[in-house]
Image (cartoon, rainbow, N blue to C red):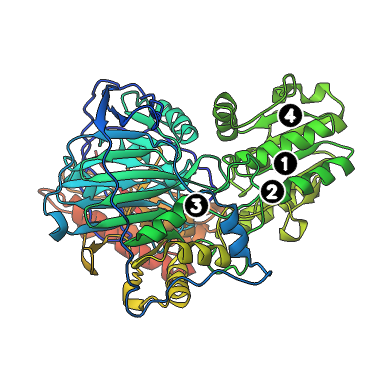
Amino acid sequence: MENNAKTSGAESEKKSAVSSQGQTTKLSRNTKNTKTTKNIKNPKAADSKKSAAKKIVTEEGQDQKVATEKKTPAVKKKPSTGRRTAPKRNTDNKTTPADNIAAAATAGSNGKKVYRSGSHKKSGGKNGKLSIIPLGGLGEIGKNMTAFKYDNQIIVIDGGVAFPEDELLGIDLVIPDYTYLLENRDMVKGFFITHAHEDHIGALPYILKDLNVPVYGSRLTIGILQGKLKEHRLGDVKLRDVSPRQTITVGCFKIEFIRVTHSIPDSFAIAIHTPVGVILHVSDFKIDMSPVDGQFMDLGRIATFGEQGVLLLLADSTNVEKEGYTASETSVGDRLNKLFQNVEGRIILTTFASNVHRIQQAVWAAEKTNRKVAIVGRGMQNICTVAAELGYLHVPDGMMIDISEVNNYPDRNVLILTTGSQGEPLSGLSRMATGEHRQVQIMEGDTVIISATPIPGNEKGVARTIDNLTRLGANVIYGRDQKIHVSGHASQEELKIILNMVKPKFFLPVHGEYRMLEQHAKLAHYCLDMPMENCFVMENGQVLELDQKHGKINGRVQAGRILIDGLGVGDVGSAVLKDRKQLSQDGIVILIIKINGQNGKMVGSPDMISRGFIFVKEHERLMEEARAKIAAIMTKFEGEGTFDFVGCKNNLRNNLGKFFFDRIQRRPIVEPIIIRL
């Protein structure tokens, strides 16, 4: 998924936890500062012809030599019952797409690099069980996070956010409930990140305030994450950048990173070597045979795992409903080149801020048509800065200008890259469309290219933005038929290729709504003749237990969602959301009532303030009747002694609410304020 979300800081304070899937949760914070550990530089692999030793890098950065282990010959396994063996190679001259892809894959590994963290315990040995615990990403789009537990050790893959649904009024972000990790904080050994999209890293700034553990990811992922942590004033997090085919040993787990192609560079699949077998987690990916950066998906390594045996495969389900293959990212570049050549005025292009490959192709098209490039939107500026510094984005010298300088150049020589591809109200493009942007005003002759498709739920916002831009005289280019966007996720045929390469014993579809997970499980059953009982369609919080021969869903841990609202983390619950919904639908009426401190009698006429309920001047008769109703209620509470404030307020709320509903079919929030004189 290609998204961006605004992130905000969180106050450190103690909050109670509320269980159950889909509920909001409050977490107890424990922010202990520890000394910052510097990134580790990986040593070069030793030449096997000159030395029989290889280097292992510890977390402390010390090099140690260990004797090379002798390789044991591979034992051929018989195919398990009910499963189809790998198909024989095509012997005639015709080749299938799978054959072409397999031929392009490169196998073998040249000197793996290894991190070692902690002791390598195998408590339980072959009789132990591995627990796979999805804490987010199942039955939904976003907030991907999965824990893997063996004995008393836990590793976590990803920690992402989701965007709030329409009914979550005022909520900025949604992150996974990580109470389970807090309850087992001493077992958590680290986070291992597949790529730098928000739905995979967006929750980490909040989680890492409570869990001071290392985070491993690619150079670009760590670079983008560093910026987020800096915004949240987290400077003591241990960040480790890794390379493709690099191996990290953490306790009983050995984790290997495998390059995949996606809509952001430096994306990984992750292989986890455990005491019970190999777990292969193929996160967001597609098989792109002409990638923009020339970095191909490491199908050779994935095929090697398939030959050696994989116990469980977890794979992306986002595009499982789409037949065929996903088009290459370079096809968008070809289309952009043609569009840029035919446009005389300014070009304003919006895409996902993290889609570095799309931005790179837009820069190349601008270079060919002699255009300067300006960037609008803090998220896109931050990512482009990091990508350029690390060498993932190449912009010719003198080509990039500040947005304040665009009026100094002819329209035909300007390209503006902006956020807002999803119709976000505060994004650069949305503010341009409403005429509220301080530096860019849409005018006749502008061409706006929306190089993205709306995420489900964002269609109305995108359509509204397109209408506003068109009304201002812009030529808006959008939609699938324009071929200006391709997905970063694998379609059915690519998913089949991975399933047939890996041939896992068990399969767990991830990253998708429930119908997608179900369809992906059926696809595995069809491709591999895999028994359906070996395909696990799970929900967040369920625990999948595996040993070398068996797998079953056994139990559940606390899982759900935590709502982020401004600086508040988990402090908005169902009661607050209910009030917000009622306010948005029927408004509020505030009653200001004065009473005599001696006898409790009402003094004067009550004041009534309406907000979002009615226009008072047009409903004066209704308000007078309401005042009479208030007076009648207040007489019941007159008398000497202690005035029953609580009972009086509840009576006013219930009776006035019913009165308004009976009269005009609206039920506003009624909030009495009683002042004793």
Report if residue 168 is visible in the image: no
Q: Amino acid at mark 3?
A: Gly
In this picture, residue 369 sits left or right of residue 3: right
Give the alpha-carbon distance from disc 4 to disc 2, as whole Å.
16 Å
Closer to us: 367 or 452: 367
Give the alpha-carbon distance from disc 1 to disc 3, as whole Å.
37 Å
- The residue carrying mark 1 is 349
Helix, strand or loop at label 3? It is helix
Q: Quadrant of residue 399?
A: top right
- The residue carrying mark 2 is 451
Q: Nearest to the eye among marks 1 and 3: give it.
A: 3
Please determine whether, in this image, residue 100 is positioned above or below residue 66: below
Give the alpha-carbon distance from disc 4 to disc 3, as whole Å.
39 Å
Helix, strand or loop at label 4? It is strand
Helix, strand or loop at label 1? It is strand
Q: Which mark is residue 51?
A: none
Q: Earlier in the sequence, mark 4 or mark 3?
A: 3
Q: Nearest to the eye among marks 4 and 3: give it.
A: 3
